[in-house]
Image (cartoon, helix red, strand yellow):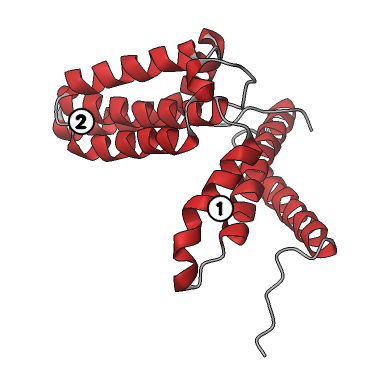
Amino acid sequence: MRGHGFLLANHIAGNSLLHRTPLWLKFLVVVACGTASFLIVDWAVSLAAFVLMSLLFLLSGAGIKRLLRTLWTVAPILLAIGLFQWWQLGGPTAARIVLNVLVCVVAASLLTVTTPVQELLDGVVSLSKPFRRFGADPERFALTIAVMLRSIPFIAGAFADVRDSARARGLERNPRALVLPVFITTVAYARQAGDALAARGLGEAEEIP
C-alpha cells in the first residue's frame, strides 16, 4: 500500500525556537486554540488567529507545501460545513466557524511537526499521571494514541487505494465496491495489530486477584 498523508503534519527534525519550546507550553497553545474556537465571535479575529498560527507553522521550518497539504486534507469537509453554515446562519458566521477549525488544525499540526512522536507520547503519559487515582492507566492511554496515529493513515490509504481500484473498473459510484473492501482491510489490520500487541504482552487486561 502506498503512503498517504494524515490530517496532522509529521515531525520534522530541527532546532528552531518552536522545536525548543517546552512540550507543556505547546500543549497549552493547542488547548488555548481549542478553547478560543468557542469564544471568538468575530470572523476577523479568527482570521488573525489563523494567520498567526500559519506564520508560526512556517517559522518551524515545515514549509509552505506542508502547510497547504495539511489545509487541503480538511478542505472538502470544511467546504461542506461552510456552505451549510452560510445557508443557515450567513457568511460571517460560516467564515468564523471554518477559520476556527483551521486554527485548531494548524495548532495541532504545529505541535506534531515540532515534537517527536516518542516525546509527545511521553508527555501524554506525564499529563495523565494525576488521573491514576481514578483508575486511569497513562501507559495504556499513550499506547492507544500511538496505535491511533498509526492506524488512521493506514485506513485513509486503504480507502484511497480501493477508490482508485473501483474507479478503474467503473464502480466508483457503487457503495459496496468502496465500503466492503475497506471494511475487510481495516478488520484484518486491527486483528494483526492486536496479535502483535498480545505477542509483546501489551494491551492485555490485568487479572484481578
Tags 2 and 1 touching, CB below 8 Å = no
Q: Amino acid at mark 1?
A: Val
Left or right of 89: which side holds 184?
A: right
Provide residue 165's location: percent of width, then percent of height.
Answer: 74, 31
Q: Nearer the viewer, residue 115 or 45?
A: 115
Question: Taking 90 as reference, is 202 above or below it?
Answer: below
Provide residue 207's location: percent of width, then percent of height.
Answer: 69, 83
Q: Secondary structure at mark 1?
A: helix
Residue 29, quarter of picture: top left
Q: Nearer the viewer, residue 80 or 137?
A: 137
Residue at 55%, 10% (x, y): give it. Answer: 65
From mark 2 to mark 1, how far is it between C-alphas? 43 Å
Question: Taking 97 as reference, is 51 above or below it?
Answer: above
Q: Nearer the viewer, residue 10 or 83?
A: 10
Residue at 67%, 28% (x, y): give it. Answer: 4
| The C terminus lies in quadrant | bottom right
Question: Taking 133 as reference, is 160 above or below it?
Answer: above
Residue 110: mark in rendering: none
Provide residue 153's location: percent of width, then percent of height.
Answer: 65, 37
Residue 87: mark in rendering: 2
Residue at 57%, 30% (x, y): give it. Answer: 115
Mark 1: few, some, or many residues within 10 Å (few <14, many ≥20)? some
Q: Secondary structure at mark 2?
A: helix
Label 1: which residue? 125
Mark 2 or mark 1, earlier in chain: 2
Q: Amino acid at mark 2?
A: Trp
| The N terminus lies in quadrant | top right
Left or right of 121: which side holds 177?
A: right
